[in-house]
Every structure is written in C-alpha cells, then in structure tokens.
Image: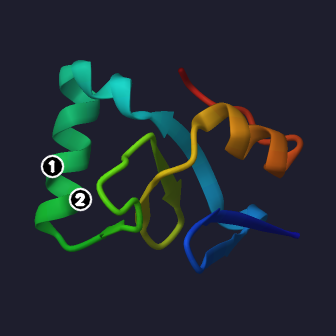
Amino acid sequence: MFLHLGGDVVVSKKDVIMILDTQTLTSPATREFIEIAGDEGFIKNISGGKEKSYVVTTREIYISPISCKTLQKRAGSIKYLK
C-alpha cells in the first residue's frame, strides 16, 4: 500500500519509519537529527511553506503540508508522534 504525503508525492507504507509533528523540533535531539539530515541532503520539502509534519522514510525525510493525524488516518496502522 501507499501513503500520499501531499503534492505529487506518494511513498510505500512499508518504507515509513515515523511521522513527526513539526512541533517536535522543540526537542534538541530531534532538532539535531533534522539538521544533520538536511546537511546531508536527505530532506525533501514538499510543503510549499505550510509545514505540518516530517515523514521519515528509509531513504528520505519529507516535510509535508499534511498533519500527522491526517497522515495516520491515511496510513491506517502506522503510529505517529505528537
């Protein structure tokens, strides 16, 4: 099965590791993880300036304009962090 992340981006549900709310960047460890991933070129911003969640997959991290709760509903059994 696939998960639509916004725009024209669809990923396989089996590749999704976690879905993070943008507010989790208040955690120093999470902020450092995202900064390092950005420096390494693993982040793909598909939000169009309306960032609501980070979707961490086995290959990349997507910044999505869709909320964690909506992505969770779309994914079914994937749990999310708020």
Asked where in the image residue 81 lies, by quadrant, the reply is top right
Q: Amino acid at mark 2?
A: Ala
Asked where in the image residue 13 lies, by quadrant, the reply is bottom right
Provide residue 38's location: percent of width, then percent of height: 18, 61
- Label 1: state its secondary structure: helix
The residue that disc 2 covers is 37
The residue that disc 1 covers is 35
Residue 13 appears left or right of 67: right
From the viewer's perspective, is residue 51 above or below residue 30? below
At label 2, counting other C-alpha atoms closer than 10 Å, the crowd grade (few under 14, some 14-19, many 20 or more) is: some
Q: Residue at x 87, y 40 (%)?
A: 77
Q: Amino acid at mark 1?
A: Glu
- Label 2: state its secondary structure: helix
Residue 23 appears left or right of 82: left
How far is disc 1 from disc 2 in space, using C-alphas? 5 Å
Numbered label attached to residue 26: none
Q: Residue at x 74, y 39 (%)?
A: 72
Front residue of 81 and 33 = 81
Provide residue 82's location: percent of width, then percent of height: 53, 20
Q: Residue at x 44, y 40 (%)?
A: 52
Q: Are marks 1 and 2 in contact (CB under 8 Å)?
A: yes
